[in-house]
Image (cartoon, rainbow, N blue to C red):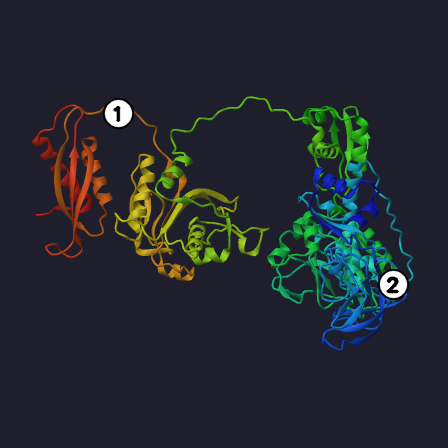
Amino acid sequence: MKFPESWLREHVATTASRDELSARLTAIGLEVEDLQPLGEGLDGVVVAEILSCEKHPEADRLQVCQVATGAGTVQIVCGAPNARAGLKAPLAQVGASLPGGMAIKAARLRGVESSGMLCSAKELGVDADASGLMELPADATVGQPIAALLGLPDASFELKLTPNRADCFSVRGIAFDVAAAMGAQVTPMQIDEAEVTSQAAMAVQLEAGADCPRFCGRVLEGLDPAARTPLWMAERLKRAGLRPISVLVDITNYVMLELGQPLHAFDADKLTGPIVVRHARAGEKLKLLDEREVTLDPGFLLVTDAGRPAALGGVMGGWDTRVTDTTTRVFFEAAHWVPSAIIGRARKLGMHTDAGHRFERGVDPQLPRYAVERATALALQVMGGQAGPITETTLPEHLSTPAAVALRRDRLHRVLGIRVADDEVERILRALGMQVAGTAEGWAVTPPSRRFDIAIEEDLIEEVARIHGYENIPTSTPTGEVRLVSPSETRVADGVLRRQLTGRDFLEAINYAFVDGDLLATWQLQDRAVTLANPLSADLGVMRTGLLPGLVSALARNQSRQQSRVRLFELGKVFHQAAEGGAPVETPRIAAVACGPQSAEQWALDDREVDYFDLKAEVEALLALAGAEGEFRPDDSPWGHPGRSASVWRDGRRIGWLGHLHPRLARALDLDLDGEVVGFELDLAPLAARAVPRAGEVSRYPSVRRDIALVVPETTPFSALRASLQAALGALLRDVVLFDRYVGPGLESGSKSLAMGLIMQDVSRTLTDRDADQAVATALEALAKDCGARLRS
């Protein structure tokens, strides 16, 4: 929220200096993000009138102007493109010093005398406009100090407001907080009802139910289209960060900044009525004031005229019914749009408006009528004309009424740790516009309708604390019992997994949990995606369904910055819609990606690219932390390279994916890489689960090894052979070592030879050759039955 200091002081009388005011605003939670002094040190700058302009004899872009100063006529050489006879503009006289430090002296410019300088708004330090001379009203008094004309010096405050303080998106709302903090009083603001001198009116119907329970409108006729925005209003708007546009638009913006109620001005001659507020129909189109045509859905609200869309409710007006410089009849509209009906609508269209910003956070439902009356008074003052009656349509059953909240003095003391005097508590609450009634235990406080954030006792305690001053509340160390929770032995801690990967030369990444829906579609991960109703931006509108898209995007950004070897991992949650339509399901996962050389550049190792087996080793190392072994089966995930990726299984359950990225996906993502991207993504819960460690007996007897070579179908994985051996030999088998794989001459097509060593050991005796031979026979029998294996001759 941006506003000029002079405007705030008009609503609350305080003798505090500018610096004191700024410090106090920040102290009570309205953080001053920026403070810009305006128009300081303008002594010697006056209103002047250009009487004549002649071309400079030695310069095409300069003019020699005769300028009236109120105390005579001086000659000024000026290069501004808008310098012309009859223009009134600021003149820095000889001896003046401008805010930028420029001292004005008499000078000769290209051989022509110049006694002073005609100024732009930027040179005066009141605006950023340096395109030409600052044009002053035609009725400005020549010779009048410019500071007096423009109400200078002044300052522009910009507050960083928290979302719950929607009432402070207006000068009037801020004034209540300042009055409470400074021990001052808010200046009464009486908005009188305008005299009705016209019967022109628009019928209004509300068909959107609770989304728009109040709508006020008024027709004004006989307006002077030649009227211009008064200088005082234009200056206040500019100091509040808004550009003056036209008198009617400026009036609506002025009222919005002053009271907090956004309004819209329709050209009444372009309306036929009745005005109907309803939800948009699917596919309905509307051309907005910014000349964009948008396609709507039933989530949007419309103000319609005779069935046609005329404005996007709570966001922006329509192009066809806009006011122009020729408008003589206007329809002022002020409505109460509930936040839930407006939140995210503007962002869905890729836009942001001051009205939408306010309505998303909540606007006082009692304001519409007062705002229309205020806009009416300003319009009649500036443009003349006649006012019709206000048309107010209300659905009272959908309008909330502030309820009294109990504040107990003992609870206040217990939370703050100090006792605040009863009269000080009452002063603070009443200064904030609340109704206070005493009770036996404390007070019954009814907040004003603009304070949506006051709902429970703690809200009132916070109000007392921030206005009384956090610096007046003593600091004390919290006391109480802290229960230490020991880590579970049945799960590998996240920190252990992190240390494992960081020790293996991976760097941890943290990506947004919300991503672009198009990115998920590119990965074919859009199924059951959770769409956000109120996204931060259009490209962050969906909750991620996988960690790999974010990690690969981070990898690509590193690659584009000349990082040829990238190894990243992330622990985080992914989100899916529940199958039965309940709350979204959150699944913790761990994922990693790598590209480039397997090892950092050095003299001792050959330079080779990271591949599937490198990442497979990382997955096996993670499983080993849980005392488990994984099984890797062929996988057909659309993002995986066919034949070079696998699904990871543990204890008969699929826990994730491992492999190379599909080349088609790499092209779709515009990955400009020399090598390939390899990665994995695993569900964290089944990966990290482990059995409670138990002590086992250590055999005192030697082990026995027997090597066998088997011929098996090419599609049979080694994990299947190992599982069959373990089932057949039980505790006798201590390990299986695969030491050779052969495919080629001597074997039939579709077969492979695997040579392995069986290591056997007993805890009660030394195994004999007969025992070992019997075990091998049992193993071969089981392998033939389970895997179709035969001993290679």
> What number is the disc on residue 696?
1
Q: Nearer the viewer, mark 1 or mark 2?
A: 2
- The part of the image, by quadrant, that contains residue 470 is top right
Q: Nearer the viewer, residue 234 or 110?
A: 110
Q: Is residue 149 left or right of residue 442?
A: right
Q: Is residue 214 visible in the rendered structure shown here?
A: no
- Residue positioned 70% across, 25% down in the render: 411
> Whole-percent x and y of residue 417?
69, 24
Q: Nearer the viewer, residue 532 or 325?
A: 325
Q: Is residue 82 visible in the rendered structure shown here?
A: yes
- Residue positioned 19% across, 46% down in the render: 787
Count of labels shown? 2
Q: Amino acid at mark 2?
A: Ala
Q: Between marks 1 and 2, how big is the CA–CA gap? A: 99 Å
> Whole-percent x and y of residue 494?
42, 36
Dot 2: few (<14), some (14–19), or many (≥20) neighbours within 10 Å? some
Q: Secondary structure at mark 2?
A: loop
Q: Amino acid at mark 1?
A: Gly
Label 1 close to label 2 by CB (< 8 Å): no
Q: Secondary structure at mark 1?
A: loop
- The part of the image, by quadrant, that contains residue 569 is top left
- Residue receiving disc 2: 140
- Determine whether 521 is above or below 223 in the image: above
Dot 1: few (<14), some (14–19), or many (≥20) neighbours within 10 Å? few
- Determine whether 477 is above or below 670 in the image: above
Q: Is residue 71 left or right of residue 131?
A: right
> Whole-percent x and y of residue 206?
74, 56
For marks 1 and 2, the one nearer the N-term is 2
- Determine whether 276 is above or below 546 in the image: below
